[in-house]
Every structure is written in structure tokens, then in C-alpha cells.
């Protein structure tokens, strides 16, 4: 089919060949711990959630992946749109030294202190030995469930990628983005995530339409067993985050 107007009900479409298909997802700052105890921070936007689980897509040469494979722990720090300058400061940087060959051509440089460059504040997690970024309105502590190859037989993926499934173990949120009178629900009218679409930064506009899906209580999505409730006592870590 050629996508003519007659075949699409009067609306023209065209077959296109974009180099990337980053149609718009939230920016995530993944906090991990380096082998020397230094906190690492990496911006990415290939992430999606189901319940208290998240799937991350990462380049196989990243320092973040190396840390995830070694420690099995991370924090998914979610910056708001007003933190865009912090995120952009650590773009094209890596915690790997030397810089991986596949990143050299894109202009990446080695930075040991990513938090310092971003001008964000690291803080220890409650359930993981990975850093939270205090300024981010949402911080999700997580442990790795599994790591699998992604796109290994796909000729349109230019470098080795991996899919990392993580399980959320604790969620921290700034009080000013919570629903009034409900301390366990994030208010979508107050939460303004930073969005990346085709490598450019965007924010959200206002609500565009009443949602039928939002017509029943959000708690119906909560599983019967709640092993990671907000009132769970923090785990005792072997040593403090450096």
C-alpha cells in the first residue's frame, strides 16, 4: 500500500525512514554506585513501567550497565521540566574511562563526578546502595530482576543494546506533587515530568480530555500483597553510600 489519500480516509500518510524512533518518553536519571564508591548519574529516556516494575534500555558500553551488572541496584530519579539544565549538563558524558570507542565519535567525554557537574545532590537510598537525586520530585529505588539482549537480530539497531528489568522497592516523592489528602498518590496535575522527543526536551501541557480509565480508584491497580509499602522499615545497609 502506498498510503494514498483514498486509502486513509482522506488523510495523507507517507512511508518514512527516521534514523531513530524516540517519539517522546520521560527523562530518567539513573543513579548507580561505581566500584570505588562514587555515585554515578546517567540520563536516559528509554524506559517504561508496569505496576512496580520498569524496563530500561541501555547501551552495552555504558558505565551504568556495568554498575547494574555488578551491584544489581539503582535509583530511577525522575526530573521535572524545571531541572532541564541539570540534565543537559551531563549529556554527552560517561563514567567510563577511557571513553568507549562507540561514544568517542559522538563527542562523549569522561566525567568522574556526574552529580557535581549536574549540580544535583546525592543521597543514600533506603533499600539500595545507589544514589537518589534529592532535587528530583520522584525517586524510585530498584533492584535488577533480569538483563537480556535487545535487538540482537535487528539490522536497524546500530550497536549492542540490553534490556534491563528492574523491580521497584521504594518510591520517594516531593510532598508538593501529591494529591491533597492522599499521601500515597501522585497528582498528575502537579507532576510536570521532563520529556525527551527526538533528542529535544519538552514539558507537558495541561490535561486535554477527561479519561475514562481514571474513572475508578487508582488503588484497584494495587496487588493484594504489598511487600514494599510506604511504611516498610528500611533495610540495614552494609555500609553507607559514599
Image (cartoon, rainbow, N blue to C red):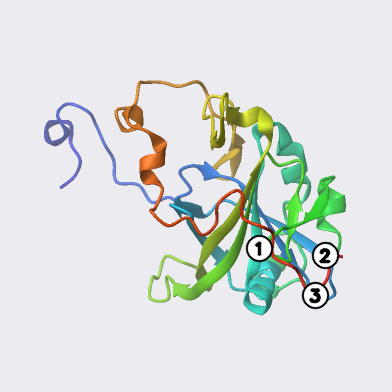
Mark 2 vs mark 3: which is more N-terminal? Answer: 3
Q: Could you tell me which residue is drawn at 82 percent across and 46 percent down?
A: 120
Residues at badges 1 and 2 in contact (C-beta under 8 Å)?
Answer: no
Label 2 vs label 3, nearer the camera = 2
Which corner quadrant of the image does residue 98 belong to? Answer: bottom right
**In the rendered image, which quarter is residue 127 located in?**
bottom right
Q: Position of residue 16 (x, y in %)?
A: 35, 47
Q: Is residue 105 left or right of residue 191?
A: right
Question: Which one is in front, 130 or 162?
Answer: 130
Residue 204 numbered tag: none
Find residue 74 and name its label. Answer: 1
Between disc 1 and disc 2, whose residue precedes?
Answer: 1
Check if mark 3's residue and mark 1's residue have beta carbons within 8 Å: no
Q: Which mark is residue 98?
A: 3
Residue 241 numbered tag? 2
| Residue 20 visible from this viewpoint | no
Out of 189 and 172, give the one closest to the viewer: 172
Q: CA distance from mark 2 to mark 3?
A: 25 Å
Image coordinates for residue 19, horizontal then vertical, percent? 47, 54
Percent coordinates x, y for residue 116 in the rendering: 87, 52
Amino acid at each position: 500500500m502506498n498510503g494514498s489519500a483514498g486509502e486513509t480516509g482522506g488523510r495523507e500518510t507517507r512511508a518514512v525512514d527516521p534514523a531513530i524512533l524516540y517519539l517522546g518518553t520521560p527523562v530518567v536519571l539513573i543513579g548507580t554506585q561505581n566500584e570505588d564508591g562514587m555515585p554515578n548519574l546517567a540520563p536516559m529516556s528509554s524506559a517504561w513501567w508496569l505496576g512496580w516494575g520498569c524496563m530500561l534500555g541501555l547501551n552495552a558500553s555504558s558505565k551504568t550497565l556495568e554498575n547494574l551488572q555488578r551491584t544489581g541496584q539503582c535509583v530511577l530519579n525522575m526530573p521535572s521540566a524545571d531541572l532541564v539544565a541539570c540534565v543537559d549538563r551531563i549529556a554527552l558524558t560517561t563514567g567510563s574511562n577511557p571513553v568507549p570507542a562507540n561514544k568517542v565519535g559522538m563527542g562523549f567525554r569522561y566525567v568522574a563526578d556526574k552529580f557535581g557537574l549536574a549540580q544535583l545532590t546525592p543521597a543514600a537510598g533506603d533499600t539500595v546502595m545507589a544514589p537518589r537525586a534529592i532535587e528530583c520530585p520522584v525517586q524510585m529505588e530498584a533492584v535488577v530482576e533480569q538483563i537480556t539482549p535487545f535487538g540482537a537480530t535487528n539490522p536497524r539497531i546500530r550497536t549492542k543494546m540490553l534490556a534491563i528489568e528492574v523491580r521497584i522497592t521504594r518510591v520517594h516523592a516531593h510532598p508538593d506533587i501529591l494529591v491533597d489528602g492522599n499521601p500515597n498518590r501522585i497528582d498528575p496535575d502537579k507532576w510536570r515530568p521532563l520529556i525527551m522527543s527526538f533528542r529535544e526536551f519538552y514539558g507537558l501541557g495541561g490535561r486535554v480530555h477527561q479519561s475514562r480509565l481514571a474513572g475508578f480508584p487508582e488503588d484497584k491497580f494495587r496487588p493484594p500483597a504489598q511487600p514494599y509499602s510506604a511504611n516498610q522499615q528500611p533495610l540495614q545497609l552494609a555500609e553507607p553510600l559514599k
